[in-house]
Amino acid sequence: MRALLNFFRLDTSDAELARAQFRSLSAHLPLLYVILLGNALAIAVVFFDPDKLIKTLISPALICGVAMSRGVWWWRSADPEGLSDDEIRSHLHRTGALSVVMTLAFELWCIWVYNDGDAYGRGSLTFFLGLTEVSTVFCLMTLGPVAMRVAVVSTLSFLFYFSWADNGQMLAQTIVLCLVSAGMVVVVHRHTHSFSELIRSRRNLRMRQHETEKLSEENRRIAFTDPLSGLPNRRELLARLDRLEARADLPRNSLAVIFIDLDGFKAVNDEHGHQAGDALIRSVCLRLRQHCPPHAMLARVGGDEFAVLLEARDAQSAALQLAHTMLEEIALPVLVDRHVLQVGGSIGVAANVDAAGSPRELLRRADIAMYHVKTQGKGQVAIYDAGFDEGRLRRLDIEAQIGLGLARGEFDVFYQPIVDAYSGAIVSVEALLRWPRRPEGALPPDEFIEIAEATGQIHPLGLFVLERAAREIGPLGTLHLSVNVSPAQFRDPAFERQVAHVLEQTRFSPERLQFEITEGYLLANPERVVSAVETFKARGMSIALDDFGTGFTSIHYLRSYGFSHIKLDKSLLAGLSPGAKATMLVTGAINLARGLDMAVIAEGVETEAQAEILRAAGCHELQGYLFGKPLPLAEFIEACRRSGRPLGAERWLRAAG
C-alpha cells in the first residue's frame, strides 16, 4: 500500500528538477486551461436550459472562471527566476491538489447534466469529457504523479457512472477509456522518468563543465603564476605585453618596463642553501609588491629576476622613481633562520618614448639596461639608451670569441717578476692571461676577463693559466708562481680537485704555488674562503690577499684566514714620497702585516724612489714596471738574463722560518 501511495506522491526535494517542472507547466497549463474552458463552454451550450441555470450556466461559469484565472496566472509565471525554491515547491503542490479538484469538479458537473441531454448531447459530453481527460494528463506529464492522479480519478469516476448509465450502453466507451488511461499512465510514468533523467543529466553535465572550467582555470593559474612567490610569471607577463601590443591607441610615454636582477643571490644559495634563497625571494617579493601601484604588474621572470609593467602618464619618470624605491627596498637585510641575509639590485628601465618602443621591445630594452648596470658595478638604476645595444652586441661577440680562441690556442700566459725588496733577486713571478693572437686584434684583459667571469668561461681560462704556468715555470729551479683566482673559481666546489689534478699532471710542487684572491670576495664569502684556504694550505700552497687597501678588510679577517701574504694595491703608491700621508699609510699597513707574520708585496712599483720608501717601510717583495713588464716566457727569461737578477731566491717566509 505504501509503495502504491509513493507512486502517486509528488516529490519536490530536487530543487532543480522542481524548477524545470515549473517551467514546463508554465508553458503547457495555459493551453490546458484554454482546452478546459472551450470544452466547458461547448457542453454548456449543448445542455443549456433556462429553467436549470445553476446546472447549465452558473456551474460551468464557475469552472470557466477558475480555469481562466489559473491560465492567466501560469501565463504570467513563464519565468520562475524571481521565485525561491520554497515558492516553486508550494506552487507545484498547490497545482497538484487543484488539478485533482478541478478534474473531479468537471467530471461531476458533466455527470450531473448528462441525463438532461438527448442522444447527441450525451455523445458530445462523453467525447468532451474524454478529450479533457487526455489533454489534462498530457499537459501534466512533466509532473508525473499529478498526471497519474488525474488519470486515475477521472477514469474511476467515468467507470463508476458510465458503466451502468443508459442501461450499460456506454460500457464499451468506458472500457476503451480505461485502456487509454492505463496506456497514458505508462506513458506518463516513462516520460516523467525520462524528464527527470534529462534534468539530472544536464545538471551533471553542467557540474562537469564547471569542474572542467575550474580545473582549466586552475591549470591556467598554475601555468601563469610563479609557484614560489605567487606572482605572475614570465608567460603571463608576455601575454599581457601581447595584449597591449594589439592596441593601436597606446600613447607615447604611457608604458614602461622595469627589469630587476638581484645582486649576490647566487652566493646566498651557495652559502646558505636553496631554502634560505627561497625565503629571501619571498621576502623580496612581498616588499616589492607593497610598493607597486594598483595599475602596475609585478612578475617574477626568472630565478632572481623580476619585471614591473607600469601604465601611467609620464611612464618613464614614474618608473624611474619606482625603480629607485625598489632598489632601496631590495638592499634592506632579511632575517632567515637567524642569519641576516642581504642582496642588492641592478635595475633597468625602458619606456615607449619612441615609435619603435613596442611593449615586447620594452622588455628587451629594460633587460639590456639592467645588464648595462651589471657591467658598470651593479647596485644602480639605468634608463635604456641605444648605445647599450652596441655594448651588449660587443660583449656577446667577445663571449663567442673566447671559447673559439681557447680552442684555437689564441691565448698566452705572460709573466711579471716579483723581486726581493733587499737583494733584488727574482723570487716569484705572477702569471697573467693575455690574448695576443685574436684575429680581430689583441684585447686587453680588462675587456674580456669580466665577460669570462659573467659567462662562466673563466673556469677553463683559469685552469689554462694554471696548467700552462705550472709547466713553464716548473723547470726554473725554485722560482715561485703566483696565479690570480677568480671569485667564480673559488665558488666552484670542484676547484680544489681541479688544482690538485693540474699539479699532479705537471709535477709542480704545491709549495711553489701561490693563489691571489681579491679582498671583495673575501668579505662576500667568508665561509667559503675559510674552507678553501685551509684546503690549499694543507697541501703546502700559500694564499695572498690581493688589492689590499681598496676595501674594508679588518684585522679580524686577516688573523682568521691565515693568509701568507698581502698585496698592496698600486693605488696606495700614488703620491708616495718622504713624509707624505701616503707613505705613513703604506708604512702602517706594512707594520700591521708584519705584526701578523705576513709578508707584504707591493705592486705597481715604477720608480726607484717608490722602491726605496717601500724598503725602508719594511716591505718584503716588490712588483712593477721598474723590475719588468709582463712578457712571454722566452722574453721573460731573456730579460732576466740581461738584468743580471738571479732567479729562484728563497722567499721571506721560508727564510724567516
Image (tube, rainbow, N blue to C red):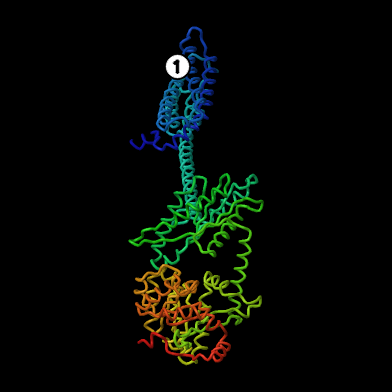
Query: As rendered, which of 132 and 248 lies closer to the eye?
Result: 248
Tell which of 121 and 353 is nearer to you. 353
Task: Say which residue label 1 marks.
Answer: 112
- The image shows residue 611 at horizontal and vertical percentages of 48, 80
Left or right, 562 with respect to 187, comes to left
Q: What secondary structure is found at the residue carrying circle 1?
A: helix
- Locate residue 152, reporting x and y percent: 43, 30
Q: Is residue 314 above or below residue 392?
A: above
- Residue at 54%, 50% in the rendered image: 319
Tag count = 1
Across and down, in percent, residue 143 comes to 45, 33
Q: Residues within 10 Å of mark 1 (few under 14, many from 20)?
A: few
460 or 80: nearer the viewer: 460
Q: Is residue 301 visible?
A: no
Q: State the residue in front, 100 or 616.
A: 616
Residue 595 in sight in this render: yes
- The quadrant in which residue 99 appears is top left
Q: Quadrant of residue 554?
A: bottom left
Q: Quadrant of residue 146?
A: top left
Q: Which quadrant, please, contains the C terminus?
A: bottom left
Give the vertical position of 556 relative to 385 (above or below). below
Quadrant, the N terminus: top left
Q: Position of residue 571 (x, y in %)?
A: 49, 71
Residue type at numbered disc 1: Trp
Outermost residue toward the top in this view: 51
